[in-house]
């Protein structure tokens, strides 16, 4: 295909073929970043008076409205979605406060809650997931995935927007965590870096089936653990050690560890 023909085809695809217009990437990033900072790390000027806070809150609503309009939603529909989303912001805020306190109470390295807000990638990823999940509940197309993928790029934590996660959720360190789309996680669950909650295998025909595990309340999953399958249930109050591979259900109060094996080599020195 010559360049003129290719460019013509590209133009036609961009203009007419795709179902949704492409969002301005800076717009949605700015919205979620601003919302996060508004809730947890506000600039000093926002603390000068309640009026500054109210004014900024209205700006956030307008930004989300603009994003919906970019999707070519009707004006009435965009306003309705904005209203529903922001009606749920107090609930999202409250559950994130419980998440932050759970991290503070769990992590001996954490000194104050402000440290969680400012510097914990696991909390940032959880916050953006909870924002995206609310948009996913509203059946907003594409945007929820864009938000959680943005968090993924910034933190290494990949949480699908449609996963269901309870309160007091703790992600320690964060890097390399994958939580699949139909995962269900209960309350007070702690997950370390490198954990995968995934599907046993990938097949497009399974898109409407539960393919990812269920993690019940008060489970701790250490680094590198892999838990797969939609029928797999990790019973409450269980502990899964590092690097375990789980494809079957585990009863409550279980402890699953990889057996450590030590072999003593001979005492000869290495030589070339």
Image (cartoon, grey):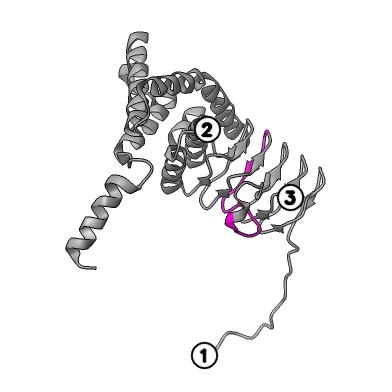
Q: Along the horizontal axis of the image, is 56 left or right of 130? A: left
> Which residue is painted at 52% across and 39% down in the image?
161
The residue nearer to you, when weighing 103 against 160, is 160
- Check residue 219 in the rendering and tell me which mark sits there, or answer none: none
Precedes in sequence: disc 1 or disc 3: 3
Q: CA distance from mark 1 to mark 3?
A: 49 Å
Q: CA distance from mark 2 to mark 3?
A: 24 Å
Q: Secondary structure at mark 2?
A: helix
> Which residue is painted at 69% across and 58% down in the image?
244
Query: Quarter of the image containing the N terminus?
Result: bottom left
The residue nearer to you, when weighing 7 against 101, is 7
Q: Tell me, yes or no, if residue 112 can be seen here.
A: no
**Where residue 229 appears, x then y in whole percent?**
69, 53
Q: Along the horizontal axis of the image, is 156 left or right of 13? A: right
Can you tell which of label 1 and label 2 is closer to the viewer? 2
Q: Tell me, yes or no, if residue 4 can be seen here.
A: yes
**Where residue 37 appears, x then y in whole percent?**
39, 28
Above or below 113: residue 239: below
Precedes in sequence: disc 2 or disc 3: 2
Q: Along the horizontal axis of the image, is 31 left or right of 205? A: left
Magenta residues, start to end = 187-204
Q: Which residue is mark 3?
A: 232
> Which residue is painted at 34% across and 32% down in the image?
72
- Check residue 130 in the rendering and tell me which mark sits there, or answer none: 2
Q: Along the horizontal axis of the image, is 237 left or right of 128? A: right
Q: Is residue 95 magenta?
A: no
């Amino acid at each position: 295909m010559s360049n003129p023909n290719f460019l013509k085809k590209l133009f036609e695809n961009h203009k007419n073929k795709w179902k949704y217009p492409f969002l301005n990437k800076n717009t949605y990033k700015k919205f979620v970043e601003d919302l996060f900072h508004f809730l947890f790390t506000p600039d000093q000027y926002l603390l000068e008076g309640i009026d500054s806070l109210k004014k900024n809150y209205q700006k956030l609503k307008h930004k989300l409205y603009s994003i919906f309009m970019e999707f070519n939603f009707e004006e009435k529909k965009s306003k309705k979605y904005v209203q529903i989303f922001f009606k749920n912001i107090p609930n999202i805020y409250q559950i994130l406060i419980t998440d932050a306190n759970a991290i503070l109470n769990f992590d001996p390295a954490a000194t104050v809650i402000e440290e969680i807000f400012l510097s914990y990638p696991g909390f940032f990823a959880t916050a953006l997931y909870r924002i995206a999940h609310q948009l996913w509940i509203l059946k907003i197309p594409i945007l929820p995935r864009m938000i959680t993928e943005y968090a993924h790029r910034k933190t290494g934590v990949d949480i699908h927007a449609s996963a269901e996660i309870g309160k007091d959720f703790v992600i320690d360190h964060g890097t390399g965590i994958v939580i699949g789309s139909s995962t269900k996680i209960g309350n007070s669950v702690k997950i370390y870096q490198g954990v995968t909650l995934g599907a046993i295998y990938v097949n497009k025909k399974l898109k409407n089936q539960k393919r990812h595990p269920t993690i019940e309340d008060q489970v701790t999953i250490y680094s590198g653990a892999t838990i797969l399958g939609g029928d797999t249930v990790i019973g409450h109050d269980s502990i899964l050690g590092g690097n375990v591979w789980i494809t079957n259900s585990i009863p409550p109060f279980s402890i699953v560890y990889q057996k450590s094996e030590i072999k003593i080599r001979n005492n000869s020195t290495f030589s070339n």
